[in-house]
Amino acid sequence: GEDVEQSLFLSVREGDSSVINCTYTDSSSTYLYWYKQEPGAGLQLLTYIFSNMDMKQDQRLTVLLNKKDKHLSLRIADTQTGDSAIYFCAETTPRGYSTLTFGKGTMLLVSP
Amino acid sequence: DAMVIQNPRYQVTQFGKPVTLSCSQTLNHNVMYWYQQKSSQAPKLLFHYYDKDFNNEADTPDNFQSRRPNTSFCFLDIRSPGLGDAAMYLCATSRDPGQGIPEQYFGPGTRLTVT
């Protein structure tokens, strides 16, 4: 079945690195995504990783994928107060039209 | 800028009074999705259209319907809203999954309040 789990809350200080973790259960996942949602807004795609990759780096963002453990992480370097938001992990599987299954989201709070 | 637009951003309706939420896109994407997101929960897919082909999720209540009159527009109709239907409703679009990365682009959402 499909299930995506995330820790609910993370608090860091400005300038530190943040690591948000996610586990998923569907081994047939093809793409895994990280979305950001600011208060009252829609979801913004931050980055994605294909399931045959271990790591992807995009500026301050690093995604690590451990397919054996079905574990995905998002590292944000030099975290800023503007990074405060809810971060959703999502997976897509080869069924239907690439429908997404989301985790419940991790609220990241960055303090000055 | 190409984008996904949702109107209205905030909608208040009365218990049992039908309501329609709208979504439009300038991306010319084949696929359009409607998600329901309740407070502190993951977005939950209600249904999606691949062109005119409608795909309902198995657990979407019959109270929720959708229409897609053309590529650009998609509507979510709630026939008899209950208090439990109060939520943020998110519209998203994507290209044909066979055309590269299956990336979904989201609108800003419509927050529905039921009184």
Image: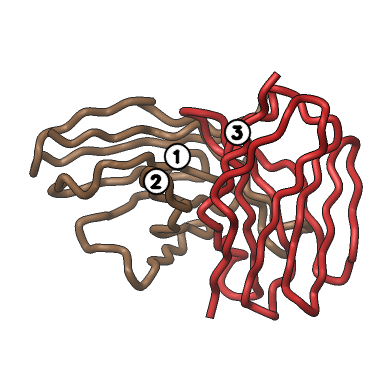
Chain represented in red: A
Could you say where residue A31 lies in the image, as x and y percent from the top left?
74, 64
Describe residue B31's horizontal placement relative to residue B56 as left or right. right
Describe residue A105's horizontal placement relative to residue B110 as left or right. right
**Disc 2 to disc 1, how far (Cα)?**
6 Å
The colour chain B appears in is brown
Q: Nearer the viewer, residue A95 or A38?
A: A38
Could you say where residue A96 lies in the image, as x and y percent from the top left?
56, 72
Whether residues under marks 2 and 1 lie with C-beta atoms below 8 angstroms apart, the answer is yes
Q: Residue at label 1?
A: B73
Q: Is residue A86 above or below residue B50?
A: above
Q: Is residue A29 above or below residue A60?
A: below
What amino acid does circle 2 point to? Pro
Q: Residue at x 35, y 43 (%)?
A: B75
Q: Nearer the viewer, residue B13 or B71?
A: B13
Residue B69, labelled with which disc?
Answer: 2
Whether residues under marks 3 and 1 lie with C-beta atoms below 8 angstroms apart, the answer is no
Chain containing the residue with disc 3: A
Could you say where residue B3 lies in the image, as x and y percent from the top left?
61, 31
Q: Residue at x 56, y 30 (%)?
A: A38
Q: Is residue B82 above or below residue A54?
A: above
- Helix, strand or loop at mark 2: loop
Both labels 3 and 1 in a single chain: no
Chain containing the residue with disc 1: B
